[in-house]
Image (cartoon, rainbow, N blue to C red):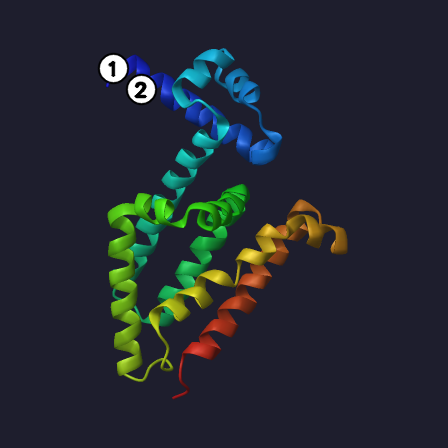
């Protein structure tokens, strides 16, 4: 690909990421992205047509980065309980940096699950193979309770989604500041890790 075209695409993508982070998906317009990139709207639309396409591209890159990190964690020579903590910590870190990504994630899964899964590609396959194998091995060794890998994944990944997605509602209830909300999320993560590990791991 021509270097000038590539540079322009990356320029638009980085501008879009900054604006999405600042204004959220709904609050962002194509004009906002073009202005941030220092380009006209027609040129921005020429490369990406509409903001939904840009958001999807950025999301998939973030999802691939997350899966790469989780695969790295699963490859480490540490026990499963430590891996689960690291996975949940990484999930919270990414959710806090890109909260709108998870709202978009649920929308994509609900509306177009087959396409979404297909676009995850080989990373998804590698992650599932490693996760399934390690859950089954730990069940066989009676380290964790008898549970299928999909249920275990749902428990580990699902606990921290609500506090991120429901931030506006929680803010209405508690009137958080940015710092106090971040502290709340970290405390929720510790509760979630404790609940997950107490449920999954058998007492010695």
Residue at position x 58%, y 62% from top? 188
Left or right: 14 in relation to 28: left
Q: Using the image as rendered, state which of residue 200 and residue 26 is in the foreground.
A: 26
Seen at 31% across and 58% down, the residue is: 73
Q: Is residue 122 above or below residue 74?
A: above
Q: Can you give x and y, in whole percent of width and height, for residue 78 in the image?
A: 29, 68
The kind of secondary structure element at disc 2 is helix
CA distance separating discs 1 and 2: 6 Å
* Label disc, if present, on residue 6 of the rendered structure: 2
Image position of 202 with respect to 90: above or below: below
In what quadrant of the picture does the C terminus appear?
Answer: bottom left
The dot on residue 2 is: 1
Q: Which mark is residue 182?
A: none
How far across and down, in percent of the image, does residue 129 sit? 24, 62
* Figure disc tally: 2
Rendered residue at 42%/46% (across/down): 112
User: How many residues crowd around disc 1 within 10 Å: few (fewer than 14), some, or many (20 or more)?
Assistant: few
Q: Position of residue 3 (x, y in %)?
A: 27, 15
Q: Is residue 145 above or below residue 178?
A: below
Outermost residue toward the bottom in this view: 204
Could you classify mark 2 by the number of other residues whose Cα lies within 10 Å: few (under 14), some (14-19), or many (20 or more)? Answer: few
Left or right: 101, with 162 as reference point: left
Is residue 39 something that shows in the picture?
A: no
| Foreground pick, 108 / 86 | 108
In which quarter of the view is residue 53 placed?
top left
Does residue 187 show up? yes
Front one among 143 and 152: 152
Image marks 1 and 2: residues in contact by CB distance under 8 Å: yes
Q: At numbered mark 1, what does the secondary structure look like: helix, strand or loop? A: loop
The quadrant in which the N terminus is found is top left
């Amino acid at each position: 690909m021509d270097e000038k075209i590539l540079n322009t695409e990356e320029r638009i993508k980085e501008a879009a990421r900054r604006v999405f982070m600042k204004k959220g998906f709904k609050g962002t317009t194509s004009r906002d992205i073009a202005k941030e990139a220092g380009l006209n709207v027609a040129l921005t639309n020429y490369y990406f047509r509409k903001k939904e396409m840009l958001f999807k591209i950025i999301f998939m890159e973030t999802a691939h980065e997350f899966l790469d990190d989780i695969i790295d964690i699963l490859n480490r020579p540490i026990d499963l309980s430590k891996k689960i903590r690291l996975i949940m910590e990484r999930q919270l870190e990414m959710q806090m940096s890109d909260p709108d990504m998870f709202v978009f994630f649920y929308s994509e899964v609900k509306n177009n699950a087959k396409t979404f899964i297909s676009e995850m590609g080989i990373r998804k396959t590698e992650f599932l193979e490693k996760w399934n194998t390690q859950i089954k091995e730990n069940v066989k060794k009676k380290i964790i309770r008898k549970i299928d890998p999909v249920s275990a994944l749902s428990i580990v990944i699902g606990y921290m989604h609500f506090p991120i997605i429901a931030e506006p509602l929680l803010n209405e209830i508690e009137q958080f500041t940015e710092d106090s909300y971040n502290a709340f999320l970290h405390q929720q993560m510790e509760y979630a890790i404790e609940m997950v590990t107490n449920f999954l791991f058998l007492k010695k």
